[in-house]
Amino acid sequence: MTRLAAGSCLVIPVLLAVALHGQQPAPQSVAAFKTAPGLEVKLWASEPMLTNPTDLTVDERGRVWVLEGQNYRRTQRNLPDFRPQGDRIVILEDTDQDGTADNVKVFDQSPQLRVPLGIAVLGDKVYVSQAPDLIVYTKDADDKIVKKEVLLTGFGGPDHDHGLHAVVFGPDGKYYFNQGNTGFDLTDKSGKHLQTQGTGAAVRPGPGYYEGAVLRMNGDGTNVEVIGQNFRNPYEVALDSFGNVFQTDNDDDGNAWTRLLYNMEGGNYGFRGPMNRTWLEDRGTHWHNELPGVSPNLLRLGAGSPCGLVVYEGSLLPAPYRGQLLHAEAGKRIVLMYPLKDDGAGFSATMQDVVNGGQDTWARPTDVAVAPDGAVFISDWYDPGVGGHQMGDPEGARGRIYRLAPAGNKPKATPKVDLASPAGLTAALGSPNQSTQFLAHMAIATQGPAAATMLKGLWHQSDPVIRARALWLLGGLGADGTAAIQEALRDKDARFRVLGLRVARQSGANMLAISKPLLRDTSPQVRREIAVSLHGGKKIAEIWTALAQQHDGKDRWYLEALGIGAYGREEDPSTRG
């Protein structure tokens, strides 16, 4: 969240003087919200059931898990905690399907939980991002904690806005997360050491990555990789079923340069310039986009406090929302949609309001998550300001959850996930809900080659989301997987040709051989993906040169993809454009 992201143009002391008593009762507040045509936002839960929600997720049963941050920044300011027993992880449920939560369960509460910034519920595991640690709980069917352990440690920013953010399960079976520019110095479970070369107090000087980063790993904490770097404070990573990775980033407090990003693997996104200097120190532009080697921004968002982000791949919301990014913006007090369009080798986007906080100056949306039925849940920190490590609510005792759905939609009981039948697995794999997708993905992956027949059937369906999710699982299954990848590489839809390259790469294919038939592809996005896949490879000169010769001299996405592919081989005469 972005009080959590600390990048707001709002001035906290002024706000406190005029708005300390400006809060509204939850029903009155939500009644004044402005919602996009055809949609309806309703109050689902409020204080005292929960306080100060920093992040939320919805599990496969339709329950909403919320991280609370009532003790926000009390240690940094040497103040006593509002709640000495510690912050909480709570589970909220609407047991009678009347549209409001009626049951609250405390999953965990501890003085060591201090404004955690991310939560994911994946099977019997609950991943909680609480710098300096990524914590994993193992729970039983009744939500009793069986085990609590630190999966990874060494993330900067305890009790800080720019720390470790939420884990997101990807369609490739990997776990994605991001870290703000307090940096990290960690050793993963496979013994790999990764480190940032930042200025945060928690990070020792030395070689490594710069500032904030987006990372991925296996579920057991092995093979941690940095896939993008040099951000200020990205709040939450979001993936679509084709493996495209998006996030937002915060500017240097109030400079109207918050941004939406598409992450090309291996990209440098320019928060710091050469010699790790800020834009003020080297007199560059805010994100150093004028420099070669800096990947472009997808969209400049202006002043604000960007928070939670999700790709909506459900069917409950109207067609214009499907496949698009939904974003909680605490500074602007709105939930936004960013309609995406292909733009050369990358994307372009515009902004559309989905939910606007209206006249309530305390409304502060911090996260968005999709339920199994396709409804969107929104958390509201509810405070007069954001940023600067301040909290205007004198007791930190308020917070709300809203449900966004088509006008007139009534909640229904969430059916139990069926993982025993092909029909049940198909429905679960196609769910818009992350926890449900995870269960289906893992159940199918466990079958190994025995799942090939079912996956081939899904791959040949018409639904692009189901097709994409199926190919990620099918691609590694021997001859059937190889045949499906080849079909994807010949698909008339460029999204599937890009997906075929990604699945082939994940499956360990010879990417030079796979790529050659696509070197003259009509889509610059396909050629971009080939360029990015060359990073760290050998004998790339012929392919890289063929790609470079097709650059139109204008497409910055394409140019930077070429740079990523050639990184480390710049002195090879054959890769000099």
Image (tube, helix red, strand yellow):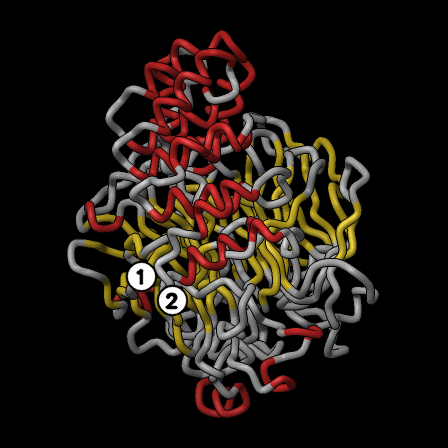
Tell me the crowding category of disc 2: few under 14, some 14 to 19, or many 20 or more residues within 10 angstroms, Cα based.
some
The amino acid marked with disc number 2 is: Leu
Residue sitting farthest toward the front: 573
The amino acid marked with disc number 1 is: Ala
Q: Residue at x 58, y 87 (%)?
A: 283
Give the image quarter of residue 425.
top left
The reply to whether residue 158 is visible in this rendering is no
Q: Residue 139 in the image: x percent, y percent?
A: 64, 32
Helix, strand or loop status at disc 1 = strand
Q: Residue 509 in the image: x percent, y percent?
A: 55, 26
366 is higher (above) or lower (below) than 567? below
| 89 left or right of 100 in image | right
Helix, strand or loop status at disc 2 = strand
**In the foreground, 354 or 86:** 354
28 is higher (above) or lower (below) than 577? below
Tell me the crowding category of disc 1: few under 14, some 14 to 19, or many 20 or more residues within 10 angstroms, Cα based.
some
Q: Do callouts 2 and 1 mark residues in contact (Cβ within 8 Å)?
A: yes
Q: Which residue is mark 2?
A: 299
Q: Residue at x 71, y 36 (%)?
A: 222
Q: Which residue is mark 1?
A: 349
Give the image quarter of residue 147.
top right
Q: Residue 144 in the image: x percent, y percent?
A: 65, 33
